[in-house]
Each structure stands twice: as C-alpha cells, then as structure tokens.
Amino acid sequence: MGAKLSAKEKLMRAEVAPISRKHLSMPELINVRRLDRMKFVDALPQELRELVHEYGLSVVRSIMDSGVTRPKNIRHIVETVLDEFSPTRGTCSAQGQRPAKGMDPDKNISPET
C-alpha cells in the first residue's frame, strides 16, 4: 500500500498541469490563470480550503512554503500576526492607537490635572 501523503505533498500534487499559453490573448490568459487557481484551491483538503477562503491563497501558501502544514498551526500564525499588527482586533495592544488631544500617552491622564 502507498504511504500516507503529508499536507505539503497533497498541496504540491494539486498543482494543475500547465497548458500551452503562447498564443492566448491577455484576457484569455487571465481567465486560464483564474481557472487554474480555482482548480488548485478545489483540490486542497477542506481545512486548507477554509483557510484559503478566510485569509487568501498567497498567505496560506507562504506559510506552507515555510514548512508549517497543519491547518491549526497556520490559523494560529495568521491570527497572531493579525492581532499584533491590527489595532482594531481585540488584544488590547496600544500599538497603532493615538491618544486623544491633550492626553499624556504615558499616564493616560490630562496634563492639566
């Protein structure tokens, strides 16, 4: 019996065989590339497809290229980065937030008091 494939191997095998694109017009080429990308995503395991739909193929693929292949770990990395660098997410980080006018950012009180 064949050996069980890792998520990375499944991802690599999901690559779509290239077709001859030499004589295609630009709109035709764009359409072929879009269809190839859709076929690639459709061939992924369900957990990875969900991550692609949530975060984008380039993000998921970049993390997988770095050696992280488990969907749980990929989600953790993306969520950690988004929480750290997006001031609108819920980590209570002061990064990226400006104090109100007249407020001292170190003491969080008005300088008049």
Image (cartoon, rainbow, N blue to C red):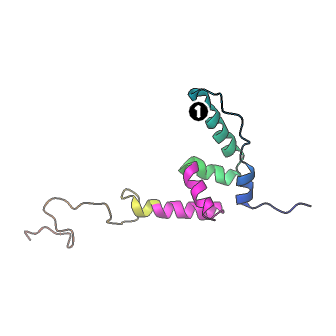
* Whole-percent x, y for residue 86 in the image: 39, 58
Please name the predominant secondary structure of the magenta segment in the image: helix
Q: Quadrant of residue 89?
A: bottom left
> Is residue 79 highlighted in magenta?
yes
* Whole-percent x, y for residue 49 in the image: 65, 49
Tag 1's secondary structure? helix
Q: Nearer the viewer, residue 17 or 53?
A: 17
Q: Residue at x 48, y 64 (%)?
A: 80
* Whole-percent x, y for residue 101 in the image: 15, 59
| Residue under label 1 | 30
Quadrant where the C terminus is found in the figure: bottom left
Looking at the rendering, the stretch of residues picked out in magenta corresponds to: 57-81
Q: Residue furthest right?
A: 1
Vertical position of residue 26 compared to residue 38: above or below: above
The answer to whether 45 appears left or right of 50 in the picture is right
Q: Residue furthest front?
A: 22
Q: Residue at x 70, y 53 (%)?
A: 11
Quadrant where the N terminus is found in the figure: bottom right
Q: Nearer the viewer, residue 61 or 88?
A: 61
The answer to whether 83 appears left or right of 23 in the picture is left
> Dot 1: within a 10 Å radius of its alpha carbon, few (fewer than 14), some, or many (20 or more) residues?
few
Q: Quadrant of residue 30?
A: top right
Q: Residue furthest bottom?
A: 107
* Whole-percent x, y for residue 9 in the image: 74, 58
The answer to whether 98 appears left or right of 62 in the picture is left
Q: Nearer the viewer, residue 50 or 69?
A: 69
The amino acid at mark 1 is Ile
Q: Residue at x 67, y 39 (%)?
A: 36
Vertical position of residue 36 compared to residue 51: above or below: above
- Count of numbered circles in the view: 1
